[in-house]
Image (tube, grey):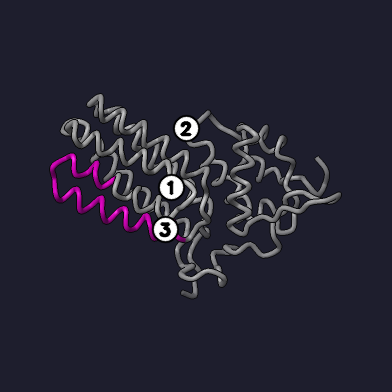
Amino acid sequence: MSDTESVSSQGEALLRGSAPSANMFEETVERLGHSIKLGLIKPGQQLPPERELAELIGVSRVTVRSALQVLVQGGFLIAKRGRNGGTFVVDHPPVWNGTNSERPNSEVSASDAAAFSDRRRVIETGVCELAAERIDELQLAALRDRVLRLSGFVGDRDSYRAEDAQFHIAIAEATGDSHLVRMVAEIQAELGSLISHVPPSEAALVHSNLQHTKIVEALASHDASAAREMMLEHVSGTGRFLHGLLPMQSSPDR
């Protein structure tokens, strides 16, 4: 690795892969995003080649490439072509030091996303567990139809988000408890607000909908434990994606 491509030992520690996970794409976005926000990969610094990053993080080159594309879209990185090309941290990342004058409502932070993810994990995993015990065939058929529609929206985040919210609300409706339906609807509204602050990613939506399929399969088998685990995996992946792209914390002068 050349000097221009070296990553600090602290940065390597943050990036280095752990045990394999079902959310490796989201975790890669999170690790790279945090490394930049913490200054472990500095403004103007060139990242190692995809192959070296993949080996360091413990993921495929395809996963690294997709994560880098998201970070380029988010304004963290810039890809340069030519003899001295490569992928570089921009001089002034848009979420540097928890502020972002280029985007409205930049008071939304990674800590907000973490707190939201905790609430969502408690509510939606429990709802999914109960739904597995109560869901009927008509409701399962409707969920399968939504997953199919979602697959056609992976290139259109706004349409995907609207259908995605309805998917999660429909699971809550399968519990037969109107209070839980209202809670999930509120969670989905909050999720939509948070997602609007990060760049769209087709790779993230494709992975999200694969997880939807697994959730429906668990519901169809009426396996409450599996349904809970599949929803936990899904919620955790979204949380990591948001956590990696949002500012570390809100600006103190707000």
Please tell me whether the stretch drawn in magenta is mainly helix, strand or loop: helix
Give the residues drawn in magenta, as a range.
Answer: 168-196
Measured in 3D between alpha carbons, the distance from the residue under mark 1 to the one under mark 3, in whole angstroms, is 19 Å
The residue that disc 1 covers is 153
The secondary element bearing badge 3 is classed as: helix
Whichever of labels 3 and 2 marks the residue nearer the N terminus, that label is: 2
Amino acid type of the residue that numbered disc 2 sits on in the rendered structure: Ala
| Mark 1 → mark 2, Cα distance in angstroms | 22 Å
- Residue receiving disc 3: 194
Q: What residue type is labelled 3?
A: Leu
Mark 3 in CB contact with mark 2 (< 8 angstroms)? no
Whole-percent x, y for residue 88 in the image: 72, 53
Q: Name the residue under label 2.
A: 22
Q: Residue furthest bottom?
A: 253
- In depth, the one of 55 and 156 nearer the eye is 156
Relative to 216, is 93 on the left or the right? right
> In the shown orientation, is residue 56 left or right of residue 207?
right
